[in-house]
Amino acid sequence: MPSSDVIVIGAGVTGIGAAYYLRAAGLSYTILEADADLGGVWHTHRWHGARCDSDFVKYSFSFKPFISETCLQSREQIQRYLRSVAVEFGILDHIHFNTRVTRAVFDLAEQRWIVHTSQGTFTARFVINGNGYFSEPYVPRFPGAETFEGEIVHTAALDDRRAFSDKHVVLVGSGSTAVCAAPALAPPVSRSLVLLQRSPTYIYEISNVADRLTRLCQALHARGVTAPLTMLRYYLQAGDDLIFVGFRRFPRLARWIFRRHWLDAVGRERFEAHFRPRYNPWEQRIAVSIGLKEKLRTNAIVIKTGEIERFTERSIRLTNGEDLGCDVCILATGFNLNILKFDMYVGDFKIAVAGINFYKGIMLGGVPNYFHPFGAWHTAWTQRAETVIRYAIKIVAYMNTHGFRAVSIERRDVGFTPPLTPGYITRCLSMMPSFYGTYDLPSIDNLVSYRFNRRSFNFS
Ligand SMILES: Cc1cc2nc3c(=O)[nH]c(=O)nc-3n(C[C@H](O)[C@H](O)[C@H](O)COP(=O)(O)OP(=O)(O)OC[C@H]3O[C@@H](n4cnc5c(N)ncnc54)[C@H](O)[C@@H]3O)c2cc1C
């Protein structure tokens, strides 16, 4: 059985980040990846307009900041970036592709993990799990969908090489996916495009041009002066945290900001109908748009807000009686959540993730030698995931120095209220672990919440 110090599950952002730090710490590792290529969501999400909405200066790894004139990057660009990191740091050779983990068992006698996969069994002292958190696409059931003569396709199955130039398209959704996809699907890619949202969401339009300060810090970084870019990343993170807290604390001010942001572009009537969500800013993730304002202003995209009552043979009928004729209906309705994609046992005891205590986004209660780096909710994933990975490696280093073989935290009940309440979290809340141990603000957590304290863990 192939053996290493650490098995990393998944070759997405988390797995590749983990591999970098393991290599730097001199630990041997193997990455088990179910797919045929690396990148995780940046490999699989191939719909029109797929991109990040976190500033990539912040989202890219701190050890390899991405230099660009644009703030947000496309799916292809992010996957290229991840591949370049994997090549530069010798990570690619450690990845076993097409190797799906089906079961992981912690052998209590040997104090090691036995990981069963579609390509055989692997063992290691530790597991770092970066298997992602999206599971199958969420496809709401619409009455009459089976009678619709056009095509209904979820973004998960959409390929951005497809053109719909002779088709009337309705894009259903209001989250980040719909907001990114709409400008990319607008004519001439489709014959016409209606963006249909069940209820409004907060959207913030940006120009996607890196500002002067960013360009200066990047230029200095390219010349080997790295401190300014490091400080800029922290500054951007602190800004995100401040906006997150400030918007939630002062919702009326936040609503006013969004009102000002949209009123001129869409006019009062459309603003009232389509841009005034029922919830307050930052109760759900804020979608970032590029080019949506202009396409709405010129009517290249028509926006509608309403509930789908049913599909007819050639249209989507809303509960207000309106019929939206279409040939193609694209569902940007998101995914269900699943943070553990295989069966996990400690000895004979099967671990259920629902309600389990999840300390600092790093360890699950009662699961030894297992780290599950979980990123930030309201900002770039890497802002916390990277810190958690470094923290996990500190724990391993401490164990190696002191001759410990196992580390765990107690299983206990903790209360958990999710910081954000988008559909994919509220739908799956009963299946989620209970996060605790941080302020959920990376700019503060990265300074104070991840100081290693041996008393936080049980070592043996
Ligand atoms: C379109 C889109 C845009 C996004 N934009 C942002 C953004 O702007 N900012 C942000 O912070 N986050 C964003 N996210 C969230 C994104 O999921 C995280 O930022 C981050 O990419 C998560 O990385 P990961 O490696 O943990 O998971 P994933 O990218 O999901 O990768 C998990 C990997 O594990 C593999 N795997 C899963 N199960 C198994 C198994 N059983 N055995 C072996 N391998 C397995 C998968 O094949 C995959 O390669 C976005 C997500 C999407 C889909």
Image: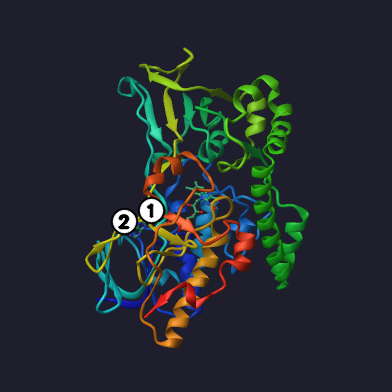
x%, y% of residue 10? 39, 61
* Residue located beneath label 1 in the image: 355
Q: Residues within 10 Å of mark 1 (few under 14, many from 20)?
A: some
Task: Report the residue at 47% width, 81% height from top.
Answer: 397
Q: Against 93, is 139 above or below? A: above
Q: Against 190, is 291 above or below? A: below
x%, y% of residue 112? 30, 76
Look at the numbered discs 1 and 2 and tell me whether their residues touch, using CB distance below 8 Å.
yes
Q: Judging from the image, what secondary structure is the residue with disc 1 in?
A: loop
**Does label 1 point to a residue whose CB lies under 8 Å from ligand 1?**
no
Residue 392 in view: yes
Q: Judging from the image, what secondary structure is the residue with disc 2 in?
A: loop
| Position of residue 253 in the picture relative to residue 372 (left or right) | right
**Does label 2 point to a residue whose CB lies under 8 Å from ligand 1?**
no
Task: Report the residue at 55% width, 54% height from top.
Answer: 77
Amino acid type, residue under disc 1 in the picture: Gly
Rendered-image quadrant of the N terminus: bottom left
x%, y% of residue 443? 64, 61
* Residue located beneath label 2 in the image: 352
Q: Quadrant of residue 380?
A: bottom right
x%, y% of residue 165? 49, 28
Q: Quadrant of ligand 1?
A: bottom left
Front residue of this view, candidates 47 and 6 = 6
Front residue of this view, candidates 389 and 122 = 389
Amino acid type, residue under disc 2 in the picture: Ala
| Position of residue 184 in the picture relative to residue 267 (left or right) | left
Instruction: Compute the Cα span from label 1 to label 2.
Output: 8 Å
Residue 66 in view: no
